[in-house]
Every structure is written in structure tokens, then in C-alpha cells.
Amino acid sequence: MTGSTALRARGLTKRYGSHNTLVRAVDEVDLDVPAGQTLAIMGPSGCGKSTLLHLVGGLQRPTGGQVWLAERRIDTMSERALARLRRDDVGFVFQSFHLMDELTAVENVELAALLAGRSPGRARKRALYLLDRVGLADRAAHLPSALSGGQRQRVAIARALSNEPLVVLADEPTGNLDSAATVEVLRLFEELHAAGQTLVVVTHDARIAAVADRVISMRDGAFADDNRFASTTTGTVYGGWR
Amino acid sequence: MQDVVLAMLAKEPAHGYELRGRMRDALGPLGEAMNAGQIYVALARLGRTGLVTSERADGLPDRPDRRVYALTPAGQQRVAGWLAEVSWPKPDLTEFHLKLVAAAAGRLADPVALVDAQRREVLRRLRDTQRAALDRSVDPVVGVLLEGVVLRLRADLEWLEVCERMWTERDRTGRKAEV
């Protein structure tokens, strides 16, 4: 996958309303995310970062511009093809986890694979493998209500990985987590990054920068700044109070 | 620095290098920037004011790091006073605030661009500190310090967001007024 582009957008635009009430949630954005990159998109609420994530993940249609996911143009796809693409090629992680309360951790994780037509045996095997990977092998039979916030988010990340997505898109994944649980999720993202997973995280939490190769600051629907970090090796730690 | 050195000696007398080691352990990656010379300067001053005594250790060369330092009763009193004192480092935001005001007033630079540059720098520091905190080998006590630094830097980023909103708005209304 190295060298290829996982996500590409050109002139991507989403407008709401008309005339006097026109809001440019996303305004002519160009974006290239190379495969294997961990990209964080930051900005104040209302800057358009969640809308951008929905557009590149095929959850919303743009009002202008083009989007490609691994060389496949998605903004012109049929609703049906788009649904299949979201299921098979995109892993979503949300702030409020979106787990099914009446299903156990392993059932939540395997659901996506079952919907994609995998055999129950294979789906279960993969789900158990993923739960082990996120450090929750011993919680497989627990209901979400018996898990902590950090554990629930890790189950949600395992679920996002179930169909080996081309890209994982996360919307405020640490928004509902305390400090210790945030660290758990950051470590997991770091591992996914090391394993070559392409990851786009939209967040208000600057701690995500610790595991990102690149941080884009967004305001008024456009990119205001694009920070690329040379490598993810530990640099100099800021010493002293300031 | 003098109060810290004094308090670190309160448990028991120690060699200069031991004292340095204790401080390094407590600071983790933040201690790498610490200058060993500062400790010996502090110890020398504390010696002159009668708060510590030191003696040459048997069989070791007579160098500041090899001497054994101990608190005097006056030193112990000072430590007790320091522990009871309520002081807190003040983050100084006025300089950056005035930089933005001056830049805008004299049209020297775009305040929003200055905010962007500052944000990049704070983000880089936050990233490095959070990376150090994610390291599984980090001592939990050191982790508490790293988390404190991260929390402060996050507050700085939030404040920069407030600055950005303000100066973006000013820029818009200013241009309108000119038309």
C-alpha cells in the first residue's frame, strides 16, 4: 500500500441553506491522505470537521467537488454501492461508541463481518482476534454496560477493523473518555499506525497529535494550517513550566 | 531551586550526585533539560547561608558532586516553611497578548498568522510531552508531571483558539469599516 493514496478530495464542498442563510460547512477543500498516514483534523466546533469526515466516508453527499477512496470515485456512486463501500472499506468510530447494548462485545465486533456475508465461524474467529488485539480478550462475553468507557471505545475500534477497512474514520473518539481511557485509545491508535492502518481522526483533543503524522487545523470550512511531523519518534520533551 | 534542593535533602544526608539522581528520577524526560550545575550553585548558596552543611566523603575526591550534604536545623525549619507556603507558577500570557495588539495596531503582521505560528509550536510541545507520557516504561510519578504539562498546553491551545476568533473577527469588521 505504501506510496498509494487512501483518500483524495478535490474542491470538496458542502453547503446548507441558501441565499442569506447559506452556510459553507466545507468550502472547496483539497485533501490527499497517503495510505498508512494517521491524520488528525482539528478545529473549533462548527468549523466543518465532522462534515468533512462524513463526506469522505460516504455518509453524506457533497454539494460540489470530488472524493476518491483508494482510486474509486465515491461522490457519484449509487446509494447501494456506497452502502457496500461503507460496510466493506470504511471503519467508523464515534464519540458515543454506538455499540448494540443487547449484544456482547464479541457479537458487536462480528456483526459487521456477518452483514458482509462472512461465515459465522470465520466472523467469530476474526472478532476474537480483534478483541485480543485491542487488549480485551477476557471481556468478549461482556455486555457493553459491563465495560468502562475506554473498553467500550476499544470494542468499537475492534468493530471498525472487522472488515479490514482501507481507512478508519474517527469522530471525537476520546470525547467521552477520561484521561486514563484516552491514553488507552491513543496507544491503540499508535499500534494501528505501526501496523500500517490509514487513520483519519477528527477531534478537539490535541492529545491526538501525539500519535499523528499530520495535524490539519480547520476553520470556517477550510484548512487554515497543515502540520506534518517528520517522524513519530520521540522528540525533545518540553521542560520547565514555560 | 534552593528550596527544592533543600527539601530533597530532608529525608537523609546525600552525596551531590545522589541528589541529582533523585531529581532526575522524579522529573523523568523533563529532567534531561536540567543543568547539574544549578544544583551545585544552589548547594553552595545554601552552605553560605547556613542551611546545609557538607563534608568530604572518605576516599572520594573533594568535588561538589562527591561531598555529602545534610540539613542544619535552620535548613529543616526552612523546608517546613516552604511546604506550608502556597505559591503557584503564573503562566504569563500578557507578552503574547501584547504582541498581537501591537502587530494589529501598527499593521506590523497579521495577528491570525502569529496565532497560527504559536499554535504550531504549542502543538509540537504537546505532542512530544504526550508521546513521553504514552511510553509504557514511564514511571507513574513522572507520568503525573507529564500529564500536568499536557493539561497546561491544552489550555494554551484553547486560549489560542479564543485569540484566533477575536482577531479574525476584528480583521473582518476592520476591513468593512474602511470600505
Image (spheres, rainbow, N blue to C red):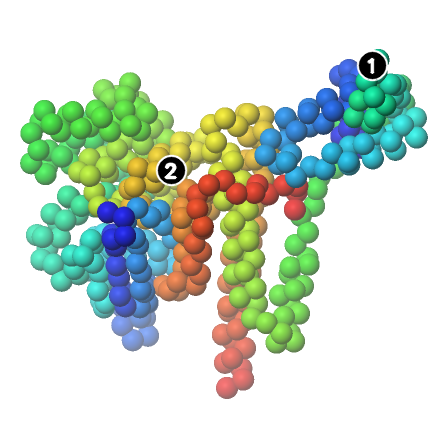
Q: Which residue lies furthest to the top in this view?
A: B58
Please name the amino acid that badge 2 sits on. Answer: Glu
> Which secondary structure, mark 1?
loop
Q: Residue furthest bottom?
A: B179
Nearer mark to the viewer, of 1 and 2: 1
Q: Nearer the viewer, residue B26 or A76?
A: B26
Q: Chain letter of disc 2?
A: A
Residue drawn at (13%, 62%) of the image: A76
> Which secondary structure, mark 2?
helix
Residue drawn at (88%, 18%) of the image: B55
Please name the amino acid that badge 1 sits on. Answer: Gly
Circles 1, 2 touching at the beta carbon (< 8 Å): no
Quarter of the image for residue A117 reads top left
Viewer can see residue A212: yes
Residue drawn at (74%, 24%) of the image: B17
Quarter of the image for residue A13 reads bottom left
**In the image, residue B3 above or below residue A38:** above
Residue drawn at (36%, 50%) of the image: A39
Quarter of the image for residue B150 reads top right
- Image coordinates for residue A99, horizontal then vertical, percent: 24, 34
**In the image, residue B65 above or below residue A64:** above
Q: What residue sits right under mark 1 in the picture?
A: B59
Alpha carbon separation for disc pair 1 and 2: 50 Å
Q: Chain letter of disc 1?
A: B
Q: What residue sits right under mark 2 in the picture?
A: A190
Q: State the mark number for residue A81.
A: none
Left or right: B116 as drawn, with respect to A106: right
- Image coordinates for residue A136, horizontal then vertical, percent: 30, 24
